Amino acid sequence: MALTFLGSCFSDEIGSEAILSGFDVLMNPFGTIFNPISLSRQIVDAIKNSEEFPLLERDSRFYSWDASTKLVGDSPVEIRELLLMKREQLRLQLSKPGLLLVTFGTSFIYRLEQSQVVANCHKQPHHLFRKELAAKDELVNDWIEAINLLRQFNPFVNIVFTVSPVRHIRDGIIENTISKARLFEVVSELTSKHAVGYFPSFEIILDELRDYRFFKQDRIHPNEEAVSYVWKRFSDVYFTEDTQEIIYKIKQIRKRLSHKSDIQLLLDDKTNQFVTEIEQNYPWIQW
């Protein structure tokens, strides 16, 4: 099963759990992206094999308005080659049977000249952008296009949305609440009219756990214990009992091997036998 995680930093957290569990995972190839418009554009452009990228130059280095600052090149040619490689990775992953989990982080968007929505402002002057709360219809329509295109491209992808429990307090506490409410409106309309799912990571963190001991020191991001709890809930919903048992055993092996300097030489017979059996019965496992 191929798992694809796109969206806010919470996608990175859950995606990391999936990698440790041995799945075939692609996680935010264009970096952490928070707004739904930029996320839908990633999927549409990948499926359409688009070769267009809006670029900018900063301090003699080149970036894309559609990607995070982690993707950078020393020339327009270099950054384009990198972006095309990432786009092809996403297209390939989406072509496989599996699950796509999209985490919406905020409904606030930044528009550049000609109303272009950017995924990242790349520390450019504020006067270049217009910040606004995205309209529900705009977000819904963008994602309807992406969903329909993905269904045509690969009918065997299970599409699931979630809303990040991470608060964007830089927008303001009240503004963050308004932003999250808009995201829930969008998800509600998408799930009611299309064959897509919703996973309640927001509710699990903020309603079930409801305690700052499940957050990092910044009191904003869920800590390792909280992420593990959400991953367990996610596994209960989307994986069979047999798969969950395999995941558990894989994690136990990884814990043992994390203390050894040479994995291949130090595997004992029992562990080696189990790894062989797993590889034979579950060839999709990624060690």
Image (cartoon, rainbow, N blue to C red):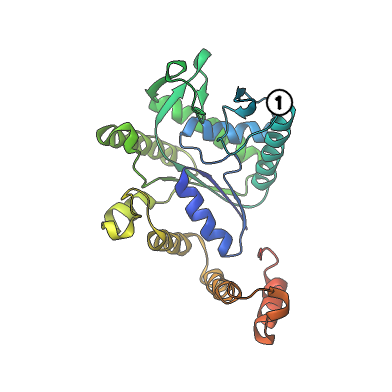
Q: Quadrant of residue 18?
A: bottom right
Q: Crowding at label 1, few (<14), some or many (≥20) Cα neighbours within 10 Å?
A: some
Image: 203 above or below 130: below
Where does the image place residue 186, in percent across and percent down from the top left? 40, 35
Where does the image place residue 245, in percent across and percent down from the top left? 53, 74
Toward the bottom, the furthest residue is 269
Q: Name the residue at 69% across, 43% down.
A: 89
Q: Name the residue at 35% across, 38% down.
A: 168
Image: 167 above or below 265: above
Where does the image place residue 240, in percent across and percent down from the top left? 52, 67
Q: Quadrant of residue 25?
A: bottom right
Side (left or right) of 265 relative to 225? right
Toward the top, the furthest residue is 114
Where does the image place residue 4, in percent across and percent down from the top left? 58, 49
Q: Name the residue at 45% across, 29% down.
A: 139
Q: Name the residue at 28% across, 33% down.
A: 172
Which image quarter holds the N terminus? bottom right
On the image, numbered disc 1 is attached to which residue?
A: 76
Q: Secondary structure at mark 1?
A: helix
The amino acid type of the residue labelled 1 equals Pro
Q: Is residue 200 visible?
A: no
Which image quarter holds the C terminus? bottom right
Please state which of residues 118 and 2 is positioned toward the viewer in this rendering.
Answer: 118
Q: Is residue 121 visible?
A: yes
Toward the front, the furthest residue is 59
Image: 285 above or below 164: below
Please state which of residues 239 and 131 is positioned toward the viewer in this rendering.
Answer: 131
